[in-house]
Amino acid sequence: MKKTREELRQALRQTSEILIEEILDWYETNETPNMSQIEAHVLNIREKLGQETARLLIQSQEAVHLSTVPLCPKCQQRMRYKGNKEKSVDGLIGLVNIKRAYYYCPLCQEGFFPPG
């Protein structure tokens, strides 16, 4: 079910607060960090915020259900739906962990995330 604007706002604020605390904790434990150290930590926080924002927006979309059960790429038998499983997707902002429909072929013993 698609999340409302307010639900997304709350989730993004919570993520932001956690990341703000993370960088402030780091800053307080380092007496005199140099510019390179500060930049490295700021870039790390920026990457985490981008990845979590993408994950939240992707996960909030309506689930796409296939109209037909996919066939196994190896043996061409019908695959079995095994629910939504977590998958790491390497996008423009780095790795994003999302939940997607997952299918399994009992004959070949291989799993499959359909595109989409």
Image: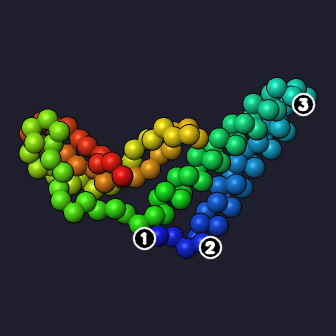
Q: Quadrant of the N terminus?
A: bottom left
**Sequence-first disc among 3 and 2:** 2
Question: Residue flagged by tag 1: what amino acid is it?
Answer: Met
Q: CA distance from mark 3 to mark 1?
A: 46 Å
Q: Which residue is mark 2?
A: 6
Could you tell me which secondary element the residue under label 2 belongs to? helix
Question: Residue flagged by tag 3: what amino acid is it?
Answer: Glu
Relative to 111, does residue 13 appear above or below in the rendering?
below
Q: Which residue is mark 1?
A: 1
Who's the residue at 44% across and 41% down the image? 88
| Image marks 2 and 1: residues in contact by CB distance under 8 Å | no
| Image marks 3 and 2: residues in contact by CB distance under 8 Å | no
Q: Which residue is mark 3?
A: 31
On screen, residue 62 versus residue 115, left or right, reads: right
Q: Choose mark 3 or mark 2, whichever is in front.
A: 2
**Sequence-first disc among 2 and 1:** 1
Residue 106 screen position, x and y as percent: 11, 43
Most extreme residue toward the right, as rendered? 32
Who's the residue at 88% across and 26% down the image? 34
Residue 77 screen position, x and y as percent: 8, 45
**Sequence-first disc among 3 and 1:** 1
Q: CA distance from mark 3 to mark 2?
A: 38 Å
Question: Residue flagged by tag 2: what amino acid is it?
Answer: Glu
On screen, residue 53 versus residue 105, left or right, reads: right
User: Within 10 Å of the Cα at label 3, are there few (<14), some (14-19), or many (20+) other Cα atoms?
Assistant: few
For the residue pair 78 and 87, the one nearer the viewer reads as 78
Relative to 9, does residue 26 appear above or below in the rendering?
above
Could you tell me which secondary element the residue under label 1 belongs to? loop
Relative to 89, does residue 53 appear above or below in the rendering?
below
